[in-house]
Amino acid sequence: MSEVARAEAPIAVRLWEGDNLAILERLANDGVRVELAYLDPPFYTQRLHLRTVRRGRGAELERTQVVAFDDRWSCFDAYLEAMEARIVRVRDVMADVGSMVLHVDPTTSHYLKVMCDRIFGRDAFASEIIWRYRRWPAKTRNFQRVHDVLLRYVRNSKVEPRFHQLYEPLAASTVATWGHTKQLAAFGPDGRRVRSTRTEADSPGVPMGDVWEIGVIAPVARERTGYPTQKPEALLRRIVESCSDAGDTVLDPYCGSGTTLAVAAALGRSAIGIDASAEALTVTRARLAAAGREVAFKTFAVNHA
Ligand SMILES: C[S@@+](CC[C@H](N)C(=O)[O-])C[C@H]1O[C@@H](n2cnc3c(N)ncnc32)[C@H](O)[C@@H]1O
């Protein structure tokens, strides 16, 4: 498909309910290929994650807690085994130009990085992104834990992967010296860098680094669904914009409240979401319906597909 035809193709959002292991195998057998897979699996918290459901208003307001998902494991090895089986299947549905972004925390990221090096090859490692957030300080005699880790791997290190450079604002000191115009790096006859020259063109900013400061979702934010562990849309926007084109397909096999799917559809990408929790899919469906997107929306139950 040409780039223009791809960008103009209608967006489809497909949701699957069930264990992603079986569904990913089915997608691979059906020949599905995705340009971006974002995985936000359980973090081995050894906890049951609950969602508070509110019904009614004012004095009639009723709050009940329902199980969103279970992150309790018999042991850490069982967690790692489950992750490995699923990452292998994600790799099987990735297009040659595709990337996988695995969102984990510092207690597991080193194990999973070694595992992904083995699955994709060390050459396929592209980035370790630190998502730095601010939150209410925890009571701990330790440094506050204020970051997650996002590991990006490409499917095929011999192929140019989808990637769009993002920019962040120029540093105040750069603006003070150079203003907002682009500078050209200049080199002397010996090949060494000399003082840059100023151009008339506006600078797009500094190419984005791998430490991202993005706030957690505020309690009153419109995007808040009440689903535990929901990730901010601003975080997903960066990932989707940088690692896919309009018209591509984005996969989230742990879609939870549907953040990735909502962002992907808003940016003109098709999306495939999978979750084993009926609660998650109820939230996701309501979220996409509220966004009123013209999306071909289907729910498949793995047993009747
Ligand atoms: C950390 S949450 C994802 C949150 C999501 N990124 C969001 O913004 O709402 C992890 C999700 O993975 C789902 N999950 C865990 N194991 C799964 C499996 N084997 N197959 C499918 N979904 C699974 C859970 O039900 C849960 O909704």
Image: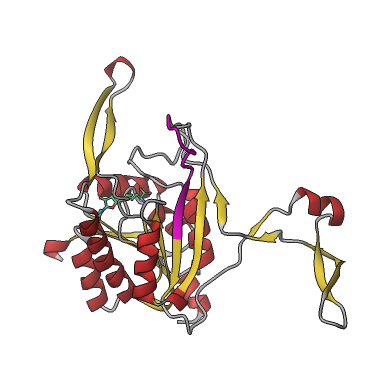
Q: Is residue 58 above or below residue 255?
A: above
**Quadrant position of the N terminus in the picture:** bottom left
Q: Is residue 45 above or below residue 267?
A: above
Is residue 302 among the parts visible in the rendering? yes
Residue nearest the viewer, comparing 77 with 225: 77
From the viewer's perspective, tell me whether residue 180 is left or right of residue 91.
right
Q: Residue drawn at (80%, 54%), measured in percent from left and top?
A: 174
Q: Residue furthest front?
A: 141
Residue nearest the viewer, comparing 67 with 61: 67
Image quadrant of residue 52? top left
Residue nearest the viewer, comparing 255 with 126: 126
Q: Residue drawn at (45%, 66%), measured in percent from left and top?
A: 152
The stretch of residues the image draws in magenta is 139-150
Residue 129 percent location from the top left of the image: 51, 58
Q: Residue furthest top?
A: 59
Residue 84 percent location from the top left of the image: 27, 66
**Quadrant position of the C terminus in the picture:** bottom left
From the viewer's perspective, tell me whether residue 213 is left or right of residue 174.
left
Residue 142: in magenta span: yes
From the viewer's perspective, tell me whether residue 198 is left or right of residue 261.
right
Q: Is residue 282 above or below residue 237?
A: above
Is residue 33 among the parts visible in the rendering? no
